[in-house]
Image (spheres, helix red, strand yellow):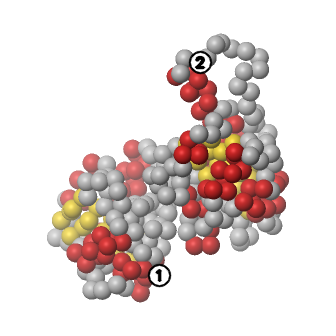
Amino acid sequence: MKKLLITRQLPEANLAAARARFDVTVRDTAVGLTMVEAAQALADYDAILPTLGDQFTAEAFIGDLRCKVLANFGVGYNHIDVEAARMADVLVSNTPNVVTDATADIGLTLILSVCRRAGEGERMVRADQWTGWGPTQMLGTHVTGKTVGIVGMGRIGQAVARRCHYGFEMPVKFYNRSPKTVDFPAEQVESLTALMGACNIIVVTVPGGGENTHMIDAAALAAMKPTGIFVNIARGDVVDEAALIAALQAGQIAGAGLDVFEHEPHVPDAFRALENVVLLPHLGTAALEIREAMGQMALDNVIAWEEGRPLPQAV
């Protein structure tokens, strides 16, 4: 049996399916592989099922490698140097499509939570500080009819936009580096700055890493309306966190909702100190049926490699 390393605990259904076919090792930790550990894994295993936080950098692919496939658990793969993998004859796959709706749902969760100040209200109730309903208590932002701006109109961006347009009658604008046609009313704008300034709510859904690193910087945030709401469900490194903190502290924008952070699991204390920020622990795909589907898709790619077939979700 081929040796398969699964770098993080997966749902039991996925582990059972993997063990029925491979000699499986599962790491019992929530901490990702370091570069040194990733290099050793590439030398010791025939196949690896990695995920976010595992450091498959270019240095990890140096030397005599046994591994022939990295079947990533997750749609984002900026923790894998794909070019270095290709040069080392290691195939790479990911798990698109199955994560789209679940991640978009978290985008809407954050939009509503920030606009309607749900985090503040929940903390008030838990602290027994609520004194009763009042006409001007906890006034937030009405979501229906507001203009939403999508940064990156891929699968997830489109899913967020559809929910906003059809569910909340929100005009949709978007910025995408290449021309994009969608099957619902949406206006593509020519620059990120133009989008940031034209919308009431900004939702970021681009892939992480590369040229997208710190795409949302001080200049982009400065273009937003002072009543603007910023939401990130992409990757933490897409946002310059220091610039976002400064914008929030100065009241330059009204609030933010974040499901991802630049150096997870570290969350800057400054974010926790701000009442107008909703913080989630990377819940984008955190539903059992979604995680099981992701695990099976990753495993299907390993099986395809073992059988000599092209990877169904090769990147």
Determine whether 46 is above or below 279 in the image.
below
**CB-based contact (under 8 Å), mark 2 and mark 1:** no
> Which numbered tag is attached to residue 285?
none
- Please tell me which residue lies in front, 216 or 49: 216
- Please tell me which residue lies in front, 127 or 295: 127
Q: Which secondary structure, mark 1?
A: helix
Q: Is residue 109 visible?
A: no
Of mark 2 and mark 1, the one earlier in the sequence is: 1
Determine whether 276 is above or below 148 in the image.
above
Determine whether 275 is above or below 235 in the image.
above
Identify the amino acid type marked 2. Gln
Question: Spatial distance from mark 2 to mark 1, Cα to Cα?
Answer: 54 Å
Identified at 54% across, 49% down, the residue is 268
Q: Name the spot of residue 201 as percent of width and height, x first.
A: 73, 47
- Please tell me which residue lies in front, 78 or 71: 78
Q: Residue furthest top?
A: 132
Q: Name the spot of residue 222 as percent of width and height, x first.
A: 78, 56
Horizontal side of residue 27 vs 252, given as left or right: left
- Return the residue at label 1: 83
Identified at 52% across, 22% down, the residue is 126
Q: Is residue 267 visible?
A: yes
Q: Name the spot of residue 314 as percent of width and height, x first.
A: 44, 73
Horizontal side of residue 287 vs 269, given as left or right: left
The quadrant holding residue 166 is top right
Q: Name the spot of residue 67 as percent of width and height, x first.
A: 29, 77
Query: Which one is in front in this view, the residue at disc 2 or the one at disc 1?
Result: 2
- Return the residue at label 2: 129
Q: Which secondary structure, mark 2?
A: loop
Identify the amino acid type marked 1. Glu
Horizontal side of residue 27 vs 32, given as left or right: left
